[in-house]
Image (tube, rainbow, N blue to C red):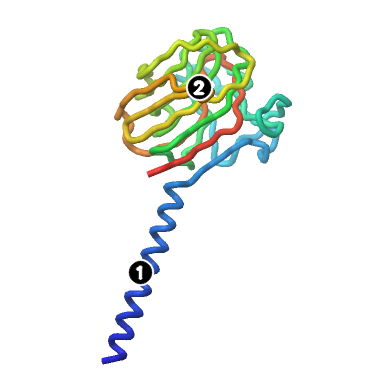
Amino acid sequence: MRRIIYLSSLLIFIMFNIHSLFAQDEHTTESKNINLSFDNVKTGQLPEGWKIEATNQKGPLATWKVIEDETAPSGNKVLAMTSPNHDFGGTFNLCWTNDIKFLNGEIKVMFKANTGIEDEGGGVIWRAKDKGDYYISRYNPLENNFRIYYVKDEARKILASARVKLPAGKWYELKIVQNGKHITGYLNGKKYLEVDDDTFPESGGVGLWTKADAVTSFDDFVVETSK
């Protein structure tokens, strides 16, 4: 009898600890924070697991790569779209990864609009299913506006917009916070945008975005996920 009680107690103890271990691992995964300054990526390359694609692609893909930049907010390297390689104004240039899954939490990046005649600036994408389905927020110095969109089946729809005047050629922080279907957008720590949308209710990839000929640099890409 004592042996049976001992074995039962031991089994309960083992099962409890296994459950605790899995719960801890699950919590760690859901609360995973990622900070990419791109300083550990070789010049001319992309971060591991990232890829170049385009929405509404007409012609060659844009060139994205890590380059040296003495003005970088941290370190001396940035990830930049350096050449559009096409002249179609409706193309959205993407550099993104499906290895980082985002559902709820915070995404922020430092960005600098370098050049652009058709378009300028850029931003972030999240909950991305593929190159034609994702949320996107961007700032455009040519239009003096900050916006949140969704892109579905390669068609873009505005969800929220604010008029903000910031000159090109300087570094700014863009931040998105999502909780369920509630999305808020910040520029340099100030909240400008707020909207509810459930077009993409599941987790998806994250990345960077520019439109047409907008040559833009990015640094300090941070993803903080929550339950």
* Amino acid at pointer 2: Leu
The image shows residue 158, relative to residue 225, as above or below, that is above
Give x and y (percent) for residue 209.
Answer: 51, 24
Residue 98 in percent (x, y) is at: 46, 39
Q: Which residue corresponds to mark 1?
A: 16
Q: Residue at x 28, y 87 (%)?
A: 4
Residue 201, x across and y down, in percent: 31, 35
Above or below residue 18? Residue 212 is above
Could you tell me if residue 62 is visible in this image? Answer: yes
Dot 1: element? helix
Q: Nearer the viewer, residue 124 or 87?
A: 124
State which quarter of the image contains the N terminus.
bottom left
- Residue for badge 2: 187
Q: Could you tell me if residue 87 is visible in this image?
A: no
Q: Residue at x 53, y 42 (%)?
A: 34
Check the image and name the residue furthest to the left. Answer: 1
Q: Furthest residue to the right?
A: 70
Identified at 35% across, 80% down, the residue is 10
User: Residue 217: x, y in percent?
Assistant: 61, 24
- Front residue of 165/158: it is 165
**Amino acid type at mark 1:** Phe
Label 2: state its secondary structure.
strand
Asked whether 34 or 62 is in front, the reply is 34
